[in-house]
Amino acid sequence: MPYRYLRRSQSYRNIENIDLNHRNIRCIICDMEWLNYHHLYYFWVVAKEGTIAAACKKLYLAQPTISAQLRVLENSLGEKLFTRVGRNLALTETGRIVYRYADEIFSLGRDLMDTVKGRPTGRPLRFNVGVADVLPKLVAYQLLEPALHLPEQIQLVCHEGSTTELLTKLAIYDLDLVLSDCPIAPDVKVRAFNHLLGECGISIFGTKALVTKYRRRFPKSLDGAPFIIPTSNSVLRRTLEHWFDSEDIRPIVFGEFEDSALLKVFGQAGVGVFAAPTVIEKEVKRQYDVRVVGRLDSVRERFYAISVEKKVKHPAVLAIADGARQKLFS
């Protein structure tokens, strides 16, 4: 960044002597407030270093100067950016949003200098994805896998949690995308858009002994069969229960699992039969050494990509959507 050179020069040191009131001028161009990037840069360095004292060493500036610049930035934004935690500074919620934008701005600035000077950036495109904890891990992998084969290198960062938690992060731009087994609910106060990636039926799996016992007369054979199911926060659980009621089938539930991978491990041990999307049938059979008892094509499971964009533009999201619709759920 050119800041490294500016701060060592006499011309840059002279900037410190300019009256702060003059530096706080807001230039209105086309009815848009002008952002002072010097102030934003000081904020970015303080946030990265954790303390103003550490930032002073990095910037070769006095502590009162940096403190004053931060106050000017906070005043211009109308929000506090830091809160004090002991001797260190912690970002407020607004501070975290500003930091993310600042990090992107100054990272792009480095790339700009490298590109202009003919040097390859070597910087992969960061892609932050939230994966709902109820989503089968094998499905999540198959959905995300096309993003790893783009011409430009992708740095994939996956976060797992409840759909509500992930949507909160999406709303403040901590995530680029959320993968879920359900669309965003109408009562959720987050401006986001659902993108249906595809749907498929359900397969019922079990060990060799269980398959031998329950394959005949399927699906009626599931009445009284040992079953392990997802917890109630899963769409698959609610869908299965609705189907059981409609078919007057009452399996014996031997366990409920929030983690889909752990559920399959218990299924592998023969605790009971279990359900998983038919789209990952081959992978489930291979990875957990189980067989298919039967398939419930009328029981559908849907998968969604949720983003703040109504029209998807991010190249990784486009790759995921195209891969799902043309290959995975074709």
Image (tube, grey):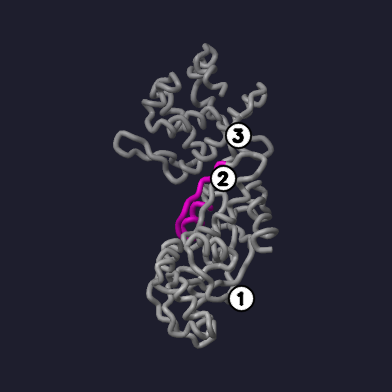
Rendered location of residue 133, percent (x, y): 46, 60
Above or below for 53 versus 104: above
What residue is at 54 percent from the left and 72 percent from the top?
Answer: 292
Neighbor class of circle 3 (other Cα within 10 Å; few <14, some 14-19, many 20+) is few
Q: Amino acid at mark 2?
A: Phe
Name the mark on residue 297: 1
Q: Which residue in the protein does label 3 denote?
A: 34
Name the mark on residue 32: none
What residue is at 56 percent from the left and 32 percent from the top?
Answer: 107
Q: Magenta includes 307?
A: no
Above or below for 234 versus 173: below
**Can residue 251 be seen by looking at this rendering?**
yes
First in sequence: mark 1 or mark 2?
2
Above or below for 229 versus 4: below
Q: Amino acid at mark 3?
A: Trp
Closer to the camera: disc 3 or disc 2?
2
Separation (CA) of disc 3 from disc 1:
57 Å
Q: Which residue in the protein does label 2 denote?
A: 127
Separation (CA) of disc 1 from disc 2:
34 Å
Instruction: Find numbered disc 1 in the image and state the secondary structure of the residue it sits on.
Output: strand
First in sequence: mark 3 or mark 2?
3
Q: Residue furthest left?
A: 86
Which is nearer the eye, 36 or 266?
266
Q: Residue furthest bottom?
A: 248
Rendered location of residue 125, percent (x, y): 59, 40
Rendered location of residue 239, percent (x, y): 53, 75
What residue is at 58 percent from the left and 76 percent from the top?
Answer: 296
Q: Quadrant of residue 279?
A: bottom right
Instruction: Find numbered disc 3 in the image and state the secondary structure of the residue it sits on.
Output: loop
Separation (CA) of disc 3 from disc 2:
29 Å
**Can residue 219 be seen by looking at this rendering?**
no
Q: Quadrant of residue 253?
A: bottom left
